[in-house]
Image: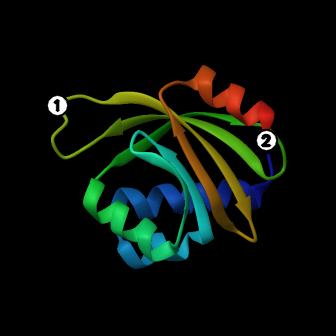
Amino acid sequence: MDSSLEQAINEWHASVNAGDRQRSARAVGDPIVVLGPKGAGPITPAQFADWVERSGINLIPRSWHPISERLMVVEEDATWPESTKSTPVATVFRASGGKITAALRLPDLRAALELAATE
């Protein structure tokens, strides 16, 4: 696994889980491509920081699945402020220049691995 990819993913998780707007904006590329239950597409770092604050999501990595030097699937336990228990999800991460340039969240590991195989 490329250590810069792993570092970028770790920083992304740390900034999102801390709910830190400024740190979150610094952790991503301009733009960052996102996918989630409410849609998909490129957004700015400021829009990403807004989502971090608005969602209150916490994503705890459970397993790491390297795809290439720039691509990794991470299975996670997701919780939200209104959650009473965690929900398993998986995110396809793409990084460039030490920043996350895509975070594509899917409902399960299989779907994420299938998507990553097409990238």
Which residue lies under the disc numbered 1? 84
Badge 2 element: loop
Name above or below for residue 42 compared with residue 93: below
Where does the C terminus fall, quadrant-wise?
top right
Kindly identify the residue that appears in the image at 41 percent across and 59 percent down: 16
Kindly identify the residue that appears in the image at 63 percent across and 71 percent down: 29
User: What's the mark number on residue 108?
Assistant: none
10 Å crowding of disc 2: few (<14), some (14-19), many (20+): few
Q: Amino acid at mark 1?
A: Thr
Badge 1 element: loop
- Closer to us: 4 or 36: 36
> Upstream in the sequence, badge 1 or badge 2?
1
Position of residue 14 measured from the top left corner of the image (x, y, whole percent): 45, 60
Name above or below for residue 110 compared with residue 54: above
Q: Amino acid at mark 2?
A: Glu
Name above or below for residue 29 compared with residue 108: below
Task: Please identify the quarter of the rendering in which residue 115 is found.
Answer: top right
Which residue lies under the disc numbered 2? 119
Where does the N terminus fall, quadrant-wise?
top right
Position of residue 102 measured from the top left corner of the image (x, y, whole percent): 63, 55
